[in-house]
Image: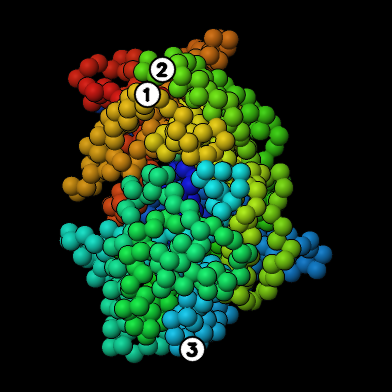
Amino acid sequence: MSWKKLLVVVFLGTLSAIAQNSVADTQGTSKPVSRPKSFDLSAIDKSVNPCEDFYEYACGNWRKKNPIPSDQARWGRFNELAEYNRQILHEILEKAAANDPKRDAVTQKIGDFYASCMDEQTVNSQGSAPLKPLLDRINAVSNKEQLMETIAYMHSIGMSPLFGFRSLPDLHNASVEVANVVQGGLGLPDRDYYLKDDAKSQETRQKYLVHVTNMLKLLGDDPAAADKEAHAIMAIETKLADAAYDRVAMRKPENRDHKMAVKDLAALAPSFQFSRFFAASGAPTFSDVNVIPPDFFQKTNGAIDSISLDDWKVYLRWHAVHAAANGLSEPFVQENFSFYGKFLNGTKELQARWKRCVEMTDRLLGEALGQPYVNQTFGTEGKTRMLKMVNALEQALATDIQELPWMTADTKKQAEIKLKAITNKIGYPDKWRDYSTVKIVRGDLVGDIQRTTTFETHRNWNKIGQALDKKEWGMTPPTVNAYYNPAENDINFPAGILQPPFFDRSEDDAVNFGGIGVVIGHELTHGFDDQGSKFDADGNLRNWWTEADRKEFDQRTGCVADEYSSFVPVDDLHLNGRLTLGENTADNGGARIALMALHNQLATDKKTAQPKDGYTADQRFFLGFAQVWCSNQTDESTRLLIKTDPHSPGRYRVTGTLQNNPDFAKAFGCKSGQKMVSQNACRVW
Ligand SMILES: [Zn+2]
């Protein structure tokens, strides 16, 4: 999960890749995956009272029949669909990899990249040799000036030791991109792991030390030296963690809003030698930079001087091997998996190599691989019906805003302006990314990875000072997810999610409005959640609220935050209602307006309004919604996600949303006093 995404864009669902650089298994086959069903009667557990636990009612039998596969940390409907998509991508890539001289440029790139990745024999025979030029360069660093230049070089090839550097839309003038430097430089998934003293955090640090030691040993360091180095790395990362804001603070746009002249940043944190760093990076020149947050750079400035050059070199060496582990030989892959996959996520075994290679091709050449994927899977009919639903949802949200009891006319007017300005992107980009300058060499996996990541890094840096390109996508076409981007004020639905269980052309509207309808409503509501509500129709950070309405909004979102903070998914760990506030607000608003849109539709469609399979249209809507979230996950993964993920686990996305919803209680005849009827129902939108 890149920090760009953490900072800017809000997703529908949890992303699977939380520092889980995946690993190796030589079997190339697994059993075929069939396309997931949408509305699934056999998933329902009728022994459960829907008014006591609607999640178990809607998903109970599915959860019993679908244990977590050994190569996964979580298994839900999202994963089923992603696995189905991956199978299609696998076939495309196997064909593209056949060394046919008549292949077009796109097929050559994805085919040879995939072939490099699948050539495990070559990868294994090389050990860590492909990393040697970078390690030699780090080794040759003899002063702090060269240290900063080497860090800049590592950034240019897609690694991010010490902090992050990238272009983002200007918070106050979203039509233009600006340079950003961002806190970072950690190997563990969250700052808390370095700072907290509970048993789990201590254990995690212990295991992390062992992991770092093992990786350095694989690079050839002797065991005693590697152990000492790992402690030096831990000391550096702990300093960085201590200076960093936590995830809840980073949600506040105000905390990410510190644009200054480059010379002022240089004065604020002189030891970073920013002018040298920027010049060495190869990024275009610029005069202003947004600093996220200044505290981080100010606080860590002293560490650059006080920590020895040798320790910094050890730290860079670790971040080099950490970032490259995926592309190296099996021992690196296995060691990486044993910490990030097994220990942190509870995954039992490494995914088959082909699965990891498909994923890597999608991640690094997604808009090349996306082209044959879209040709093969995405028709115009789906797009037309989707557009109709988006319009229906936008209308419902407009009515909802109009009828809101707590908002005054002035703010409503502003909200309507923002809603009207929301644009949508469906399926895939109008213009595909041009990879013609990226050289893919069959048999050179580390080189291929470095060249594609270098291409992406410079593509991003070259935007600094340029106009925002609203046509660009932040997700690849096969992705099973969706997002709202506050800077562009747009909602985005990749082709990958426009399938069952979200969207099924053979199902009635009740089910589809519960599935993809709620997803659309969810993304629209992000424009008005705790973060989105602070941006205006043009994507600029600007207050368009009256003071009284903002106070009321804060009170109402506070209700949602408290509600979700009361949920305890594992051990005695509570959800963080402030971290998950935007997503929970979007789930609640999304479900409400999707049902409104369905009711508008049913007024003219008598057939769908009739009960089917023993369920009324409203019941089918709520079942369709809940069944999207049927899932099982390891306790380890739950613990990790409670700390790092702005999304609540599937169970609470369902129960937390529906216990606030009077239409749900009405549809299933639930009464006050039953668990699915909140005594203190929250409502924002
Ligand atoms: Zn979301």
What amino acid type should be assigned to the residue bearing mark 2?
Thr
Q: Which mark is residue 408?
A: 2
From the viewer's perspective, is 424 left or right of 619?
right
Q: Position of residue 8 (x, y in %)?
A: 48, 47
Viewport quadrant of the N terminus: bottom left
Q: Earlier in the sequence, mark 1 or mark 2?
A: 2
Residue visible at 25% across and 16% down? 671
Which one is closest to the eye, mark 2 or mark 3? Answer: 2
Verify CB contact (< 8 Å) between mark 1 and mark 2. Answer: yes
Q: Earlier in the sequence, mark 3 or mark 1?
A: 3
What amino acid type should be assigned to the residue bearing mark 3?
Ala
Q: Position of residue 581 (x, y in %)?
A: 35, 38
Verify CB contact (< 8 Å) between mark 2 and mark 3. Answer: no
The residue tagged with tag 3: helix, strand or loop? loop
From the viewer's perspective, is 360 left or right of 21?
right
The picture quadrant for ligand 1 comes to top left
The residue tagged with tag 2: helix, strand or loop? loop
Tell which of 263 and 365 is nearer to you: 263
Q: Position of residue 230 (x, y in %)?
A: 31, 78
Q: Which mark is residue 140?
A: 3
Tell which of 301 and 317 is nearer to you: 301
Kindly report the distance in space between the C-alpha atoms of the residues bearing marks 2 and 3. Answer: 64 Å
**Residue bearing mark 1:** 549
Furthest-right residue in view? 102
Q: Does residue 60 appear in this view?
A: no
From the viewer's perspective, is 326 left or right of 103?
left
Verify CB contact (< 8 Å) between mark 3 and mark 1. Answer: no
Instruction: Give the total number of marks visible in the rendering.
Output: 3
What amino acid type should be assigned to the residue bearing mark 1?
Asp
Q: Residues within 10 Å of mark 3 (few under 14, many from 20)?
A: few
